[in-house]
Image (cartoon, rainbow, N blue to C red):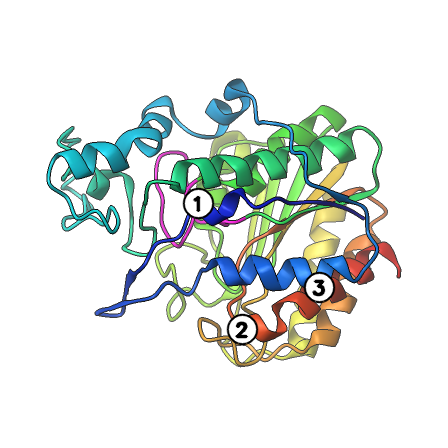
Amino acid sequence: MHIFRNDTHLQHAPVHEFYDGALIPPFESAERARIIDRALDATGYPIHETISGIPESLLTRIHTHDYIHYLQHIYARWCTAGGATEAVLPSTLAVRWMHRHSPHPLAEPGYYAFDLSAPIVAGTWQAARDAASMAYSASLAVVNGAPYAYARCRPPGHHAGSDMCGGYCYLNNAAIAAETALARGRVAILDIDIHHGNGTQQIFYARNDVTFVSLHGQPEVMYPYFLGFADEHGVGSGYGHNRNIPLALGSDDATFLRAIDDACAYIQSQHVHTIVLSAGFDTYAGDPLGGFALTRDCYVHIGRRCAALGLPIVVVQEGGYAIEALGDNLVALLHGISGV
């Protein structure tokens, strides 16, 4: 298991997010990465802190030019226009029929965001691009022959669409890993975060070279609410390459592993050559943003079931906010995959 990480993520340190009517410290914090790193240091896995920078041509196959330009420049433009220096957070969102693009720095964030949990600070672009580069580097390692690789991405990515941020996500790391892995042939993304990977689904929904499979909380009651239903199968040439498996709140190890078996059987039927695993651990019992009841042992079994498909696996870090258990849960998954 090759590990890709570094400390560029520390440049992304928002002081607050807006959550359920309150301005609070973000659940997605640098401490999550520190706890993961301490757990990884004890494993003996090879750790790579020199990350290959993601090519611009690859980045723009996943995200639009305009959105990338927005992420690069909005913090400085926002501050110059009089926005609060603490973070870029929109006060107006371009929802449903209100979707005309205004270039004003105080209006634009509402066009490129779908919620208020993706604050942008001075170092967000650098951190997000570095996380994308980690996913690229891990996937490149698999393309070059490594059986497994893990990208400790922070900020995470699966809620980021082609031109939209939200849910702590700015660039879609799993999508970038999948696009890279296409050099080996068709790819499946398996998303095990409790929150549906709405951004990943949107990016690949009309494509047939990447299959997206997501296990998550029922969208009627679980963020991001408006996508992730079982009847979303893809469109055009992508029809039949999108599979959502919503699960009830309170789901335990046995329920989740049955769903994993279903997902793995579906992936096997797709005849793919590489798996990208969007690894969120907010399925863990007691996670403050969760609602499932998984134990640490479940992640070992998830890893084993994925490895049983006999395909190279790129693991990309997503959520997980019960931080005292986060490192142990990740290591359990990686040990399950690598057979330790």
Q: Secondary structure at mark 2?
A: loop
**Residue 63 pos. (x, y %):** 43, 30
Residue visible at 80% across and 42% down? 312
Q: CA distance from mark 2 to mark 3?
A: 14 Å
Q: Nearer the viewer, residue 166 or 47?
A: 47
Q: Nearer the viewer, residue 174 or 124?
A: 124
Q: Nearer the viewer, mark 1 or mark 3?
A: 1
Q: Are marks 2 and 3 in contact (CB under 8 Å)?
A: no
Give the position of the C terminus as an image quadrant: bottom right
- Which of these two is toward me, 188 or 111? 111
158 inside magenta stretch: yes
Residue 279 visible here? yes
Which residue is under mark 2? 322
Q: Residue at x 61, y 30 (%)?
A: 179
Badge 3, how many Cα within 10 Å: few under 14, some, many 20+?
A: some
Which label lies toward us, 2 or 1? Answer: 1
Could you tell me if residue 233 is visible in this image? no
Q: Which residue sits at x=81%, y=61%?
A: 335
Between the C-alphas of marks 2 and 1, the distance is 22 Å
The residue carrying pointer 2 sits among few (fewer than 14), some (14 to 19) or many (20 or more) residues within 10 Å by Cα, namely many
Total of numbered circles in the picture? 3
Query: Which amino acid, mark 1?
Result: Gln
Give percent across and percent down for residue 229. 45, 58
> Residue 138 appears in which quarter of the rendering?
top right
Residue sitting at the far top: 57
Q: Which residues are magenta?
A: 154-170
Residue topped by disc 1: 11
Q: Earlier in the sequence, mark 2 or mark 1?
A: 1
